[in-house]
Image (cartoon, helix red, strand yellow):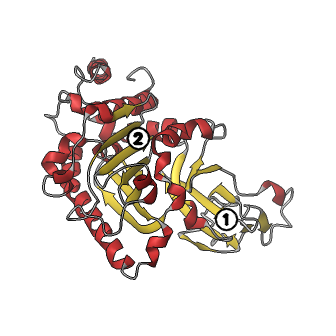
Amino acid sequence: MAMLEEVSNIGAAIERLRAPVRQAQHAPGFIYNSHDHLAREKENIFMQDWLFVALEQEVENPGDYMTFRILGEPALITRDAEGNLNAFANVCLHRGVEVASGSGNLKEFMCPYHGWLYDLTGKLIGAPYMKEAEGFDPTNCNLKRLGIDTWRGYVFITFNDNPPAFADFIAPLVKDVGYLHAEDVRIGNKIEMEFPCNWKFAVENLMDFYHVGVLHSDSFGQFFEWREDGVKLNERGGVYIKYTSASPTPEGKTQFRMLPWLEAAGETERFGCMAYLAPNMHVFGRCDVVRPIQLWPNGPDSTRAVIYHLFPPDWFNDPKFDEKCKIYRDYQIEVLEEDRSMLMSLQSAMGAREYSPGPMSHLEGPIHNTINYHVKRALGNGAD
């Protein structure tokens, strides 16, 4: 009886979440703190979709490679001698050991356990002492290929053998932030941070403008204004918001100048925008910087964030570029640290006996759209 009651309560909670935003309540705690639910998200979302993993400039030379672990699944991307990008499961075809680690530049990958050797296209080119093994066929022992594609310098991979068409997947980003010219900027900063919260809290926090005037009132909140008519939602959980902000520096003043394509389009130094492409990509635009962000689940209560600051190449010639770039880096970390204690408190509440999902504000429309998409993908139309 208790089990039936629990399932009924979960179903009712999901139905309240699915109501129109002005009638809805926030998600129940298990959505954010359950290992079982994260396992469903892994299989139904992260192993199905295209995932933003890198920028092309991080693997722009032959031999460049990067490795990742995505919810326990090892992955590897390479730039081969012909200049092509490749993606593989980073799993040796002998005992499963990862054949590469970290990032760098190599001509080949050797499994550190038994010395099996693979080239940059994933082909097995050496397997010590295997000639004597009956039936051994090296052509059947190449690294398993993963899907890989790019858009304007962003690199995406997928574990899905039959993924959604990449052109369809990326279409909302093309429409919403194509004007930021991501292909015309380069990495000034790359910041990696860990947060003690579920990955969806991190996703939602980046589109939760309801909290900006409270938690961030002494930082960027003082320059921030938005209106509901500047918000665009899509059925795939995506969000695009155009708003008024300032350069992401302590004084809200650019250390450089306007991005030339924004200036040509008639934007001002108060320009701001944000786009979310499910499941793991945000792109923020300001008058002087493009900031893509990756968010990765480490577990039900841990998230890794990768934040890039991208600037036009000619700005790197400024003799004070490194000094100026550090101002953006330090301020980014300062703002994200303001979020840390709130994200920790949110996560803690999900396991509390007295936690009961509260009503949503109409200002939380983006969160309502996104969390309902994530829940639908993970659970389907039912709650069991």
Mark 2, other Cα within 10 Å: few <14 / some 14–19 / many ≥20: many
User: Which residue position holds label 2?
Assistant: 38
Q: Is residue 198 visible?
A: yes
User: Which secondary structure lies at badge 1?
Assistant: strand
Is the residue 170 above or below the residue 229 in the image?
A: below
Question: Which numbered dot is residue 254?
Answer: none
**Residue that extends furthest to the bottom in the rendered view of this protein:** 319
- The image position of residue 66, as x and y in percent, is 57, 65
Residue 324, by quadrant, is bottom left
* Placement of the C terminus among the 4 image quadrants: top left
Of 34 and 289, the residue lying toward us: 289
Mark 1, other Cα within 10 Å: few <14 / some 14–19 / many ≥20: many
Which amino acid lies under the numbered mark 2 shown in the image of this protein? Leu
- The image position of residue 43, as x and y in percent, is 51, 38
Is the residue 293 above or below the residue 26 in the image?
A: below
Q: Nearer the viewer, mark 1 or mark 2?
A: 1
- The image position of residue 81, as x and y in percent, is 74, 69
Residue at x-position 41% and y-position 57%? 290
User: Which residue position holds label 1?
Assistant: 79
Of 44 and 330, the residue lying toward us: 330
Q: Is residue 114 visible?
A: no
Residue at x-position 29% and y-position 71%? 327
Q: Answer with mark 1 or mark 2, whichever residue precedes in sequence.
A: 2
